[in-house]
Amino acid sequence: LQQIRLENENVTAALYSQGAKSPFLPAALQIRGNWLGCLERERPENQGKDMRRKGSGLCLIYGQKQCMLMIQDWEAKNRHRYQRVVFSRPDFHWTAPHVPPSFLSMEHIWIMDGQDNGGLNDRHWIFPRSLMEMMLGAWDSILDG
């Protein structure tokens, strides 16, 4: 372990402060589904609608953004760019050994089958570093439309 960062994570406050000027955020908040899971409270701009949802989707999206920022920070400090990124959700439990990365193409995204819940399985990904902003950038997409 080379570095640890502790913070009092308030995803709701981060969403509203970073998206304060975003014309896209109000529309994004109307999209149904558990992707807004962990939104903590109503806001006056929600016009009395309770925006909270079950699940932890928003917290996971925020965590992906934080992961991307830590990778970028480490790369800048060490003047080294990773070739691949491995992202695993912190609540993911391995029941078998991981496929050796040498078995996986350096040009492709590796995503596990199943548990996609109608979307993309977000439990574990291996992808080229060149795709990091796309793979871990959902937070910015919410704010930027």
Image (cartoon, rainbow, N blue to C red):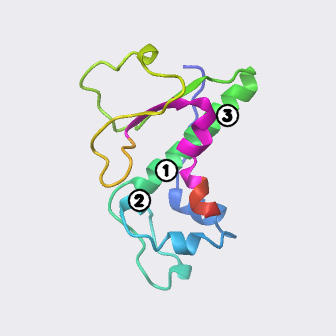
Mark 3 element type: helix
- Whether tag 3 and tag 2 are in contact, CB under 8 A, the answer is no
Amino acid type, callout 2: Trp
Q: Earlier in the sequence, mark 2 or mark 1?
A: 2
- The numbered mark at residue 77 is none
Give the residue drawn at x 45%, y 84%: 48
Label located before the other in sequence (3 or 1): 1
Image quarter (top left, top right, bottom left or bottom right) of the N terminus:
top right
Distance (Cα) linking label 3 and label 2: 25 Å
Residue 20's quadrant in the figure? Answer: bottom right
- Tell me the kind of residue under disc 1: Ile
Mark found first going from the N terminus, 3 or 2 = 2
Q: Position of residue 36 (x, y in %)?
A: 43, 62
Stretch of the chain drawn in magenta: 123-139
Q: CA distance from mark 2 to mark 1?
A: 8 Å
Category of crowding for the residue at label 3, using alpha-carbon neighbours closer than 10 angstroms: few (below 14), some (14–19), many (at least 20): some
Left or right: 3 as drawn, with respect to 29: right
Label disc, if present, on residue 35 of the rendered structure: 2
Q: Is residue 133 magenta?
A: yes
